[in-house]
Image: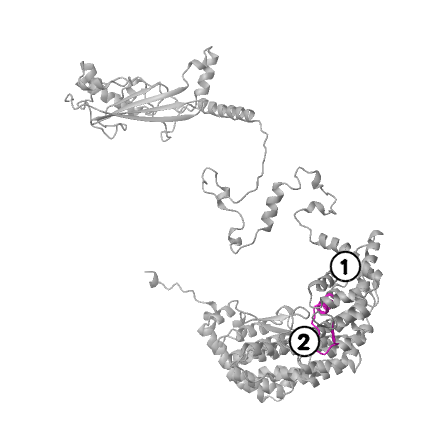
Amino acid sequence: MFWKFDLHTTSHIDTLLEKDDVTLTEVMDEEDVLQECKSQNHKLVDFLVRPQCMEDLVGYITQEPNDDVEEKIKYKYPNISCELLTSDVSQINDMLGEDENLLMKLYSFLQNEPPLNPLLASFFSKVLSILIGRKPEQIVEFLRKREDFVDLMIKHIGTSAIMDLLLRMLTCIEPQQLRQDVLNWLNEEKVIQRLVDMVQPSQDEDRHSNASQSLCEIIRLSRDQMFQVQGCSDPDPLLATLEKQETVEQLLSNIFDKEKNESAIVSVIQILLTLFETRRPAFEGHLDICPPGMNHPSFSVNQSILDAVRPRLKDFHQLLIEPPKKTVLNTTWGVLDPPVGNTRLNVVRLVTSLLQTNTHIINQELIALNTLGVILDMYFKYLWNNFLHTQVEICTAMILAMPSTQSESPEINRENDQEPIRENILIKHLFQKCQLIQRILDAWGSNEKEQTEGGRRRGYMGHLTRIANSIVHNSDKGPNGTQIQQLISELPEEDRERWEAFTSGQLADTNKKNTVDLVNTHHIHSSSDDEVDFKDSGFHQDSSIQQAFSDYQMQQMTSNFIEQFGFNDEEFADQDDVGDIPFDRISDINFSLNTNESANMALFEACCKEKIQQFEDAGSDEEDIWDEKDVTFAPEAQRRPSSGSTDSEESTDSEEEDGKRDPFESTNATADDRMEVDSGDVPEPSGWNSPNTAADAERSWADFSSFTPVSPKDPLRSNSPVAMETSIETVDPLGVNAPMQQERKVEDGLDPEEEPVSDRITETVTNGSMKETVSLTVDAKTETAIFKRASEALTAHRVPF
């Protein structure tokens, strides 16, 4: 049996491990060593967990390779060692996590001087991360005993792998109580304050970036944990430390009280933006980030953060006016001196986040500094900076739709019977001090003037259109509609008339162009050199074809759209085979095809005649006996004698000759080679009742006395005792040769119309007391065939055999 044979292929590693002096490098040189380790090959795992092998594996990922090693294989063994140690084999995890000597050797990598080797640092971080996930209690206890652990982590924070390891300690430690203990321990070690100290001009950009990213991730992870673990009573100590006013003040002091450094400024602003982020729980347990200016916050920002930022608003405002020095930037359309820069762009984003809080004291400070006016100046100055344009659009849209705060100026419309509405000081500042309406009208007019002179359209025009639409929308349906209408009515008469003409004219036309139906593309000018005028084409603009295509585009996409998308298999089948294809609603689409059917039919018939003639002329001296041939019935078959020895011998000889000849010959064969059937007219029923003559009796009744047994050498013949009468008028039952026969008639001077238009084959079968007549009528012109069957009962009077 199959299981009797040992078909299991032995791995080459098993053979190698049977050697007494095998080394670790020899095993690591095998191509399938990682696969065998992950499949937990017992011999290989037992070899790897040996103390010396484990020490060598840890040494490969913590020690720099020799310089004399070829570059291609310099990090081969460190890479394989890391993969073996992180293959998640329980024996290896137990050996590495419970042996303090191995952990000390692994930990010694952090004691190297910066900068660390980034590749080895990634190996170290990966091995320690999997140990934190598999052996959290042992690893946390080991690290807490190391007093310099936090110092070393902060020291090497410029290495991305070390930053990842720090974040892994905050996310991958379970259970919850152990994680809380780790957070308290890290907070006691002042990890937040140490990361804040890394974000200052004296440090390099890598430390700025990684320290800022670490603090941002700590904020997000802590808030995520607050939403996920609702029953946790203990607050996150790291998040609480970050939201303290003194922590935020320390961050701002690092960038404003010292020299200006763009990397440090951008990193601090990133941290502030993360603190201003608002999140709300989603329906399926996930968290949805609400970007600044798009949604109202689900909870208010910690007031301590706002208290720390408010005194520094003037410093941020000054950054908009005097950013850090930037080199002149040459672009394809002109020179930027100075360019916007990452600093000013992030300051604008910070202003957007501050406006989202809708704090009265912050709003007043921004108004006093005229920060919004400076931002609008930058908007119209830098024509092609879409990042800046987007932030300005968010600011204006948020101010127009922002409800007024309780501490703002008193309500308006007190003297009227209307419902009093509190005034929004930011909207008033935007319309009066910043003159938003006038600047929109001036910029629009300047752009149109430049375009008429052959210039290009300005890059901020799309955002400017949306700002203008926001003003119109909020004046009609917004929460501050009454105030906006009042401010527009207080504009100078000239500006008010210009605005009314602009909204009803140019702005309306622009909106109409922006919302044009893309189906009617003939209204849009094409810049292609091969432009086609659809108006002059054969399709009418309002034709049913365009309407059908428009309906197809506007149909609702359902859940089964993907299943129905594409081609149906029935589309490629013959139409005769597909009878149940569903039809959707189709508009009235009329097609007219002008074709010459008579010419095509004549050509088709000529080809058919040519092919048929070739088959008739083709022949061979030797025919294959296995080819299928049609059996034909002779119109005039000679009856064989029913009795007599001589007749029997002749019949036997004739049958032997039939076996030698081809049984499937044409109709010109002799009568002896044909089937014994009667071809005369069908006798009347009276002839069956009382045959008058012997000849009639012979023709009317079957005689079985002359039947001879069939030998294996004889050809197949019918031994049925049923008498058959067949009347055959032609040997072309399907009418294939009818056209050629008519041509021959014409050539011989005969009228083909005098010939019958149809061929008929009649066959009479007698079985028991019933007589059945089967007739086949073939019409050569219409190429149709009709079968008819008629049965008649015979009388009970019969002549015995």
Which residue sits at x=31%, y=20%?
A: 727
Counting from the top left corner in percent of width and height, residue 272 is at 70, 77
Horizontal relation, residue 322 to residue 658: left or right: right
**Residue 90: mark:** none
Segment tinted magenta in the rendering: 393-412
Tell me the quadrant of the picture where the N terminus can be found: bottom left
Residue 103 in view here: yes
Horizontal relation, residue 116 to residue 529: left or right: left
Amino acid type of the residue that numbered disc 1 sits on in the rendered structure: Met
Which residue sits at x=14%, y=22%?
A: 800
As for residue 208 lying within the magenta part, the answer is no
Circle 1 sits on which residue?
461
Counting from the top left corner in percent of width and height, residue 436 is at 79, 65
Tag 1 secondary structure: helix
684 is higher (above) or lower (below) than 324: above
Horizontal relation, residue 326 to residue 417: left or right: right
For the residues labelled 1 and 2, the Cα–Cα distance comes to 30 Å
Q: Quarter-wise, where is residue 418 in the image?
A: bottom right
Amino acid type of the residue that numbered disc 2 sits on in the rendered structure: Phe
Q: Quarter-wise, where is residue 388 in the image?
A: bottom right
Tag 2 secondary structure: loop
Q: Nearer the viewer, residue 761 or 320?
A: 320
Residue 102 in view here: no
Counting from the top left corner in percent of width and height, residue 364 is at 76, 77
Circle 2 sits on which residue?
276
Q: Are marks 1 and 2 in contact (CB under 8 Å)?
A: no
Which residue sits at x=69%, y=53%?
A: 515
Which residue sits at x=47%, y=16%?
A: 743
As for residue 411 lying within the magenta part, the answer is yes
Counting residues from the N terminus, which is met first, the one under dot 1 or under dot 2?
2
Counting from the top left corner in percent of width and height, residue 335 is at 84, 63
Report crowding for label 1: few under 14, some 14 to 19, many 20 or more residues within 10 A (C-alpha). some
